Every structure is written in structure tokens, then in C-alpha cells.
């Protein structure tokens, strides 16, 4: 199985800051990497697919990059609604696997 | 509007069975890949199963042999039959449309809670 490791597990930041979350795959997954945002009590929401493509309706302050084994999600100019938990997911092959999540909290 | 609505969750004893349903609107289930993803209380996301448009099915090792994914094309509904349930299957279960060939999940349903306890 492909293991996905996110770092950090938690992160504190202020409104207006820029933050970066990293996701590493245990083997090369090309660009089969997706990012989700989840708020408490809600279903996850797709932000970025295929490593760097912004899902329709998602603000442009979200961006993704990477290929192979190392990927990043960057949120520029944090807004109050961005404080949530973020997950990466590999879709290179089954079993599809998620990172353990990164909880972004307000400083 | 593309929408998924799950139902069928509840409290079940260990060893019991439950069938989850996911009613789709705004798109055709049989023309898409469809997945189940679960989240244990306070934990992260775990993929459970996918059914491809051609009918092929795949499962996480943790549920293989106990869970069965299926669909009813006439009802445009996805199902997850869960047998031999264990305490560790306790979770919110989400259905999600998976993109064909790329398997990203969008949209997701609101989730249904399954609690396995005596």
C-alpha cells in the first residue's frame, strides 16, 4: 500500500498569513494527488486535484504543487474560514489512501 | 444540482449487518466511479471501497470479505452492505463520486453514522 505522510500534524497561524502543508508518498505517484478541506461535523471538500488543479469554486489563494513523491498545499493570505483540517489523498492505485491530516488553528 | 444523500446508519451489535444507501441526483451513478469513505470518531479519513463504471469493485483490506459495494441503476443509488461488523467499523460513512480514472472525490454526501456496540 502507498503510505501518505503529512507534515505538520497541526499548525497555528494568523489571519493574513501564508502557510504550506507538505504531503509525502512512500512511492512515486506522478501527479495523482488530491487535497481536501474538512470542517468539524462536515463532509470533506475537494480543493485541489491532480496535484495542482484548482477545483471550481475554490478561492485562488489555495494552490498545490509537486510530482512524484513530494507535494505541497499552500494557502496564501489566510481567511477566518480557512481554519480547518486538511487531508491529502493519493489516487495512483488502490487502496486509495489519505494522509493523517493537518489541523490548521488560529494563533 | 449534483447531490448525494446517505441513509441507513445506526446502532448495531458486533457481528451484525447493516446496509447503507447513497441516493444520487444530478448525475448518473452507473456512468461514474463511486466510493465509500469512512471516518472513525476523532480520526482521519479511510477509503473503504470503490465501484467503477464498468462494474469492477475494490476494497480496503480492513473490510474485504465483509463489505460489498453495489449499485441499483434504476434507482440511481449506491449501496454498502456491511456484514460481520466489528467495533472498529464504528465511523461516519460518506459516499462520494470518484472522478473516472483519476479517483478524486467530489462531491461527498453528508455522511451517516454507524455505531457497532453491544
Image (cartoon, rainbow, N blue to C red):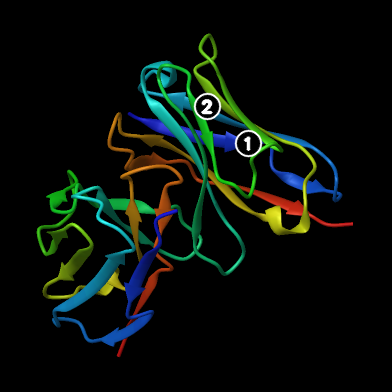
Which label was assigned to residue B18? none
Dot 1: few (<14), some (14–19), or many (≥20) neighbours within 10 Å? some
Q: Nearer the viewer, residue A83 or B12?
A: B12
Specify whether residue A101 is in view: yes
Q: CA distance from mark 2 to mark 1?
A: 8 Å
Q: Is residue B60 above or below residue B39?
A: above
The residue drawn where x is 86% and y is 49% is B13
Q: Is residue A103 above or below residue B84?
A: below
Q: Position of residue A77 (x, y in %)?
A: 12, 75
Q: Position of residue B27 (x, y in %)?
A: 36, 21
Q: Which residue is mark 1?
A: B7
Q: Position of residue A44 (x, y in %)?
A: 40, 54
* Chain letter of the residue carrying label 2: B
Q: Which residue is mark 2?
A: B23
Q: Are marks 2 and 1 in contact (CB under 8 Å)?
A: yes
> Residue most toward the right?
B118
> Residue most toward the front?
A27
How many labels, in total?
2
Q: Quadrant of the C terminus of chain A?
A: bottom left
Q: Secondary structure at mark 2?
A: strand
- Which image quadrant is residue A106 in? bottom left
Q: Position of residue B23 (x, y in %)?
A: 52, 27
- Which image quadrant is residue A14 in? bottom left
The residue drawn where x is 69% and y is 53% is B89
Amino acid at each position: 500500500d502507498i503510505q501518505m505522510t503529512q507534515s505538520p500534524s497541526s499548525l497555528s497561524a494568523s489571519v493574513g498569513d501564508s502557510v504550506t502543508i507538505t504531503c509525502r508518498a512512500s512511492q512515486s505517484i506522478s501527479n495523482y494527488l488530491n487535497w481536501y478541506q474538512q470542517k468539524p461535523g462536515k463532509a470533506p471538500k475537494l480543493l485541489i486535484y491532480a496535484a495542482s488543479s484548482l477545483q471550481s469554486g475554490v478561492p485562488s489563494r489555495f494552490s498545490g504543487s509537486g510530482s512524484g513523491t513530494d507535494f505541497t498545499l499552500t494557502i496564501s493570505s489566510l481567511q477566518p474560514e480557512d481554519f480547518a483540517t486538511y487531508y491529502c489523498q493519493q489516487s495512483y492505485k488502490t487502496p486509495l489512501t489519505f494522509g493523517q491530516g493537518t489541523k490548521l488553528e488560529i494563533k | 444540482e449534483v447531490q448525494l444523500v446517505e441513509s441507513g446508519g445506526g446502532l448495531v451489535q458486533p457481528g451484525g449487518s447493516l446496509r447503507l444507501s447513497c441516493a444520487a441526483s444530478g448525475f448518473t451513478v452507473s456512468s461514474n466511479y463511486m466510493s465509500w469513505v469512512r471516518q472513525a470518531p476523532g480520526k482521519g479519513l479511510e477509503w473503504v471501497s470503490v465501484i467503477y463504471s464498468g462494474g469492477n469493485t475494490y476494497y480496503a483490506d480492513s473490510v474485504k470479505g465483509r463489505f460489498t459495494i453495489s449499485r441499483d441503476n434504476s434507482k440511481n443509488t449506491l449501496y454498502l452492505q456491511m456484514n460481520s461488523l466489528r467495533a472498529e467499523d464504528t465511523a461516519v460513512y460518506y459516499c462520494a463520486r470518484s472522478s473516472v480514472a483519476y479517483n478524486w472525490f467530489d462531491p461527498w454526501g453528508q455522511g451517516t453514522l454507524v455505531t457497532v456496540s453491544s
